[in-house]
Amino acid sequence: MKTHFHTRRDFLRTTVLAAASVPFMGAFASSLRAAGPERKLGFALAGLGSFSTHQLAPALQKTRFCRLAGIVTGTPAKAETWSAQYNIPAKSIYTYDTMEQMADNPGIDVVYVVTPNALHAEHTIKAAKAGKHVLCEKPMEVSAGKCQQMIDACKKAGRQLAIGYRLHFEPNNLECVRLAREKVFGDLKIIEAGLGFRIGDPLQWRLNRALAGGGPLMDVGIYALQATRYLTGEEPASVSAITTVTDPVKFKEVEESIAWQVKFPSGIIASCNSTYNFGGMNRYQAFAEKGWFQLSPAFAYGGIQGRRSDGQPINFPPMDQFAAEMDGFAQCILNNQPTRVPGEEGLRDVKIMMAIYEAARTGKAVNLA
Ligand code: NAD
């Protein structure tokens, strides 16, 4: 298949500027047409935890089509700090209970939901009811039913819903998709993928099943699952899985580590791992008929790079994934085009992850086809 990216320079120009017009990952017409006067969309961050503080708010300052226009927080002290640091007026500061009043605030176009996983539906639905577009962090929610409610609420409100899949905007990952789809090394046969880290505070919500929906699979294993789906361009036919817990005090509610296998309809198989018990696993390798390519790290915030079996490096210049993701969504809204990472994409992953957990629980492969 021919893509727009005949040369490395072409690829970079389109990818970095506009988060790309890539003919995979769903229908996404070129946004490079966006001409004329530029309007910056107002983003409100809902949930001012680690990710909003250290990644999203700084990235918003680097965007071309977005600006930090509001916040939603349950902590008055954070409201004060953020208001001073980012010059956010009092009228654009909300709590989770007052979010619906955003309907009266035309300065806010998009709510970016960055709260614990099991609160994503509640906060997305409130934002949609206030007439706002929603960008929601991964995993979309903790059940397929709640994902569907989010999709329905945004549809009813006539607003777009996107999931924070930042790697769909990251050039090294996009290059691997190109290598796979253009069959540069022939048909893919086997993929290995893994992501894990050592989790700290035993009291955090990530270890609480009700708030997290699961353990490392839901939190970071989802990146390995995503990679197997965007590299193959296929949906899993069946999954099998095992989990392990060696520290039953810390991991009394969620798995400590998980290994799963996916069989795709074409016959490609993937072996994936995720853990909360050690760091340093952050990679994928795709083996094809005539060679292989890999990224290591594959899923990091920066420094993503890799190699190919023919000796060529995969190493695009540094860029800001978060800024690209938010600009990409803003352009979709401004140009009335669909996002390449819609709620339906988040729902697909949640359904597959639930099947992976079922396979681990029952010890039997689960068919998804
Ligand atoms: P965090 O714990 O640092 O922040 C969570 C925020 O939600 C806090 O401000 C907290 O006060 C608020 N909150 C509201 N109601 C809460 C409740 N009932 N219990 C606990 N906290 C509550 O978490 P984080 O790392 O910022 O993660 C937030 C979301 O972002 C998660 O869905 C996570 O998966 C996602 N995330 C995505 C990436 C990425 O690379 N895309 C990276 C990190 C986190």
Image: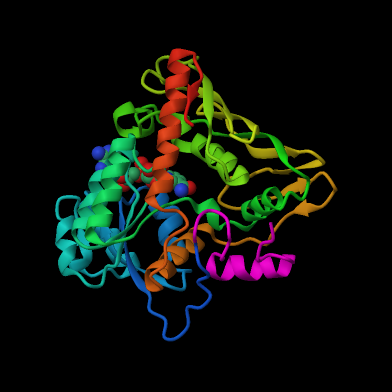
Splitting the image into four quadrants, where does ligand 1 fall? top left
Of 283 and 30, nearer the camera is 30
Q: Residue furthest bottom?
A: 36
The scheme the figure's colours follow is rainbow
Tell me, yes or no, whether the highlighted magenta stretch contains residue 4.
yes
Q: Residue furthest right?
A: 310
Of 283 and 163, nearer the camera is 163
Residue 41 visible in the current orientation = yes
**Which contiguous range is marked in magenta?**
1-27
Residue placed at 40% from the left, 60% from the top? 57
Residue 170 at x, y = what percent? Answer: 58, 56
Residue placed at 82% from the left, 52% from the top? 312
Of 121 and 301, nearer the camera is 121
Quadrant where the N terminus sits is bottom right
Of 61 and 136, nearer the camera is 136
Q: Is residue 300 left or right of residue 201?
A: right
Residue 280 visible in the current orientation = no
Name which quarter of the figure residue 271 lies in: top right
Residue 289 at x, y = what percent? Answer: 79, 38
Residue 63 at x, y = what percent? Answer: 46, 69
Residue 114 at x, y = what percent? Answer: 35, 49
Residue placed at 44% from the left, 86% from the top? 36
Q: Is residue 212 left or right of residue 271?
A: left
Q: Is residue 2 above or below residue 75?
A: below
Q: How many marks?
A: 0
Q: Is residue 365 above or below residue 333?
A: above
Tell me, yes or no, whether the highlighted magenta stretch contains residue 215.
no
Q: Is residue 116 left or right of residue 35?
A: left
